[in-house]
Structures are given as C-alpha cells and as structure tokens.
Image (cartoon, helix red, strand yellow):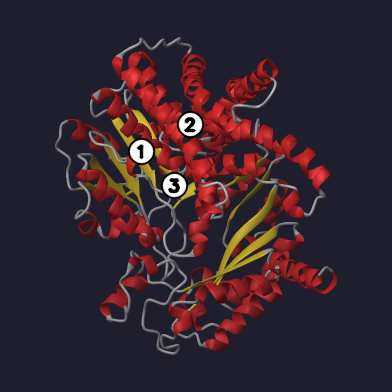
Amino acid sequence: MMKTTSSLSRSFKLIHSFWFPAMGLYFLEHCSIFGSFGVPAPWNKLIDPLIAFPARIVLLTWVWGMIIAILNDQTATARFCDFKFSIKKAWWIALIAFGIPWGLHFLAFLVIGKEILPIELIKAVSGVGLSYWAAAQFIRIKYAKTVPLPFSGSLFFLTGFLLILSTGLFFTGSLVHGSVLLERLTGLLAIQAQFLAFAAFAGQLLDARPGTTPPSGPGRTLILVNLHGGGTVVEAASSLLRQYPAFFCVLKALTPPGYRFIEYNRIPFWEDRFYQSNALVAITCFTSNCADAYRTAKEFRRRGASVIIGGPHVSFFPEEALEFCDSVVTGAAESIWDEVIRDYENKSLKRIYQGHCPEKEMSRVHQFLMESPVKIAADFIQVNRGCKFNCYFCATRSLLGGVQVEKSLEDTMALITRVSQKKKSLLFLDNNIYANPAYAKKLFAALAPLKLSWGGSASIDIAQDDEALKLLKASGCRMLLIGYEIEAGSAETGKGGKLAFAKDYAALSRKVQQAGIMIKAHFIFGFSGDSWGSLMRLWWSSFRITPVIAGLSFLTPVPGSKFFEDCFREERIINLNWRNYDLCAQVFEHPRLGHPWILRKAFMAVLLLFFLTGSVFGRLIVLFVVVKALFFH
C-alpha cells in the first residue's frame, strides 16, 4: 500500500508539469480549429479531424515519452531528441490507444444495435488498462526490455483507484453538462487522469526492473544550471532561444567519467521536482539574474546538494554569493574544475576557487567538442576570449585578468570543418573576432574554401584594413555585430580605444556594407556628457549607418568595470537591486539627465522606438503595419 501511495504521489508531482500539453489535447479534441478562422461548417468538420488527429497522436506520444524519461532519471525537462525518438519509434502506441475505445464503441453498437455506452465512459474505463499497456510498450521500445508487472495488492489498489478516478470524472462531467467552464475543467482533468495512470504504471514498471535505470553511484550526479535572463521582457523572451551554453561543454569536458549529467538550460517554468539532494550543482549567472541564481542555489542546498556558483557577477562579488552556496568560482573554471571535483568527492570544498584559462584545459574542451553531437559543437564556435580594448564601461577584460586567450587555428578549423559537414550557417561567440588582426586574416582565409555563411562580432577598425575586409567577405561573413556605443560628437571619443573611431563611423560602416556584409549596430545612451539631445544624435547616427538591426541600451555600471568602481566610490549608485542591471534602467545619478521615470522604468519603450525607426528591419515592420492598416482593414 505504501509503495502504491508513493507511486501516486510521485506521479501527481510529475503530471503537474504537463498542464499545457493537456490543454493542447483538450483543444484538439473539442475545439474547431478552422471554424475559428471563418471556414464554413461543412469544410471545417472535414478539415479539423485531418489536422487535429495527427496532432493529438504527436502530442500524446511526446508526453508519454517525456514521462518515461523523467521517471527513469534520464532527463528532467523537455528535449528535442526525446521528442524525435518518441515520434519516430512509438507513434503507433498512441494511435492504438486512441483507436481501441472507438473500436469498442462501434463493436457494442453492432452487437446491441444502439448506443448504450457513451464513448466518454468507454474512454474512461478502457483508458486505465491502455495506460498500463502503453507504458509497457514504451519501456520495451526505449530500453529493449519487456517488463512484466506481477500481480500484487498494490497493483490492484492502484488500478481500482485509477478506475474510480476516471469514471468519477466522467459522471462529474455529466452532472455539470451545460456549464461551459465546469465542463471544460472536467474534460481537462480527465486528460490529466490519463497522464496520471500512465505515469503511475510506468513508475511501477520501471521499479520492477531497476536495470532500466542508468547506474549512478551516490553523489555522482552533476546538475548544470543556466537560468533564464533576468530583468527585461527581451531577456525573458530569450529563454525561447536555448543555445547550448558554453559552460555546459566546459564542465562536461573536464568532469571525470562516472558522473551523470542533468541539464537545465533557460527553463521558463522552474518545477519543484528539479531540486535534488546528494548531487553537485553548478550554476552560472550574470548580474541581472543573480537573484534567481541565489534562490535556486538556496533551494538545492536546503535539500542537501552541494552548490557552486560561477559567472561574471559572482567573480566580482564572491562573498555575496557565498551566503547562498557552498563555493564560488571566480574567472574561468577550466584551470580549477579538477580541483573542485576532487574536493567535492573528499567533502572538503573550499569557499572560493580562482580560475584562469590554461591551454591544456582548452585542449580537453576542444576534444570534447570534436566528439560531441554537431548541434552542440556548433553552439560553441569561439576563437578568442577577452578583448583588446579596455573600455571604461565594460567588464570583459577584468574577467580574465586583462589577458586574451586564443584557440589555435588548427583546432578552430578542425572543429569548424567537422561542424560544416552538417551545418553551413555558423555564429562565432567571440566578443571581437578582429581582436588579433593577423590571426583573424588567417582564419578568414582558411574559412573561404568551406563556403559557409556566418556571423559574429567585430570592432569597427576592421574596416580600416582593406585586406581583412576582402578576406572577411570571401570567408562567408554575412553579418557583423558592431558596438558603436557613441555618436560622432560625443565627448567620450577622448577616452580612446574603439571610441576614438566615432568621427569615422559613417565612412567605415559604408566600407563594410559595400563589401556585402550587413551590420547589426549597438549604441549606448547615458554617458556623463549625454543630454536628451544626445539621444536624438544617436538615432541620427543609426539612421545614417542604416544597420539591419539597431540596439540601444542605457549605460549601466556593471560590476567589474571601472565605471562601477567610480560610481560606487562617488556614491552615485541609486539602485542596488541587481535585477535592474539589465542595461535597460537607470541605476546611477546622472549629472545632466537627473533620474526621470522613463529612464528608470520605461526605457524599453525608448529601445523599441529606436529599433523601429533606426534600423532597416524595424522600418520594414512599421511599413508593413501602416500598409495593412491603410489597405487591409
């Protein structure tokens, strides 16, 4: 009995994550898709089943596959590879599970001559047995094992409970017939009850044959956490773009064999079941999402896990982070991860580990990428780390102690050549791919024969090097992100570095564009000499450059930058809520702008207007909206 109660409790917690798929299944079964778009009734009744039924098969197969994978500790969240496997190998299970109730309903009609049992009741009763059958089939396909579940009192109790629940929801639905809201809620709960039955039977089947579960020794689990962006709506939306994090690759490459990895990459909705005990948890964060990192770390520790936090923010505020975790890694983790693992296994974690990036560990990461799936390796194409400039407002150089680290050209090309066999479009992660002009030109020349299409980031001084620009175009570069930051008349040009090129921005940008390379431009508003007129001049600069995409941010004293140190020393910081350090809010006292509401709370509106009017893509959006409003009411 206790075993059954535990199985049901685990299943209840699990299906709590599947409300959206349940809503999707309900919608596909009960709602007219094409009727909502004005398609006449005879046609939408024909078209709807042709679209809805395959969609229900796909959705149900994916949910069942995810439940099996989660119960078997293979994954904790949805993964596209699980989706592909389930659809390819097990679609027929859902097809049979959908078809049998209708077959029974039709058979009863043939025998008796009239409909005495509603199809919904047949679904409710047969669904329990079909859930057991479907779970057994999934496990057989996924793990090549037949897992019979011997009859026992706990199985009898579980089956009886699920039958009572399913039939009870059917009769409840009959009682509330006529109330649209209650009827839909009951129908949704009925789908969740089927998920519950599948999860409960699958859990017992997996427990009956522990050999289906991947072995993992006590404490030999590494949980990797890359949280969603903090702060703005833009950062929240970026959670949908789940590029594989570079630090996942680094830590997996350097972790010794025998560890099981669980990955959480920008999960929009964090579930309580994600927390585990008896594991090592590695969390990365930057300033605007450090509060989420601290909360996550605190919950993992409360359950008995050992937690390490790294990333830009905690590299400059390790003592702050140590209030919520066991250890902090400052700087790059490559040189010290072996030591971290050794100390964890010996239960002697230090409070702070100071990392750097030696060549030996970079080679180990390269080897891992060479053996990884292409879709993972393609997300970690990086030539160098660091920056040749030391901008007043930037913390990039501080993170690596002012040094630049380059990957050998041989390793870089070996990885790109491997990736290019399946992907012809790449994105370089480098802050500035032109950080070393001699290296960059060799790289561009080596890329040309591969016939790739790629994008990356570079400083505008690349346009002063005609040879580099010619090689850049021949290499397949299609777009560059260029940080302009200021307009030509800004007083910031006197600070040197890349800002010294401001007076030539328009001419240099034209050279890049004439070479056939699109520009994604970025500007910053809020320097000490800026006024509201400066914002208009920034807009005019963007208008003259005509970038494909234009971005604007408000100057922010990012921890680790000289600007932060000066603002803190001069007591100009007016907001230390790290969530507001998202480059879209004023957090320091400005000598000429004051601190109006629009800069503290509504800068996103300024950013949107800047994008819509200062970039080619933005103006196309405005044109489309205007034409639609004028001619297509």
Residue 267: assigned label: 3
Of labels 2 and 3, earlier in sequence is 2
The answer to whether 239 is drawn above or below residue 166 in the figure is below
Residue at 45% x, 69% y: name it.
583
Local packing at callout 3 (Cα closer than 10 Å; few below 14, some 14-19, many 20+) is some
Spot the residue most to the right. 631
Local packing at callout 2 (Cα closer than 10 Å; few below 14, some 14-19, many 20+) is many
Pinpoint residue 378: horizontal percent, then vertical percent: 56, 38
- The part of the image, by quadrant, that contains residue 214 is top left
Of labels 1 and 3, earlier in sequence is 1
Secondary structure of the residue carrying numbered label 1: helix
Residue 13: assigned label: 1
The answer to whether 331 is drawn above or below residue 288 in the figure is above
In three-dimensional space, the C-alpha distance between marks 2 and 3, rounded to whole angstroms, equals: 26 Å
Quadrant of image for the C terminus? bottom right
Of labels 2 and 1, earlier in sequence is 1
In three-dimensional space, the C-alpha distance between marks 2 and 1, rounded to whole angstroms, equals: 14 Å
Amino acid found under the numbered disc labelled 3: Ile
Residue 194: assigned label: 2
- The part of the image, by quadrant, that contains residue 323 is bottom left
Local packing at callout 1 (Cα closer than 10 Å; few below 14, some 14-19, many 20+) is few
Pinpoint residue 1: horizontal percent, then vertical percent: 25, 23
Amino acid found under the numbered disc labelled 1: Lys
**Res. 8 in view:** yes
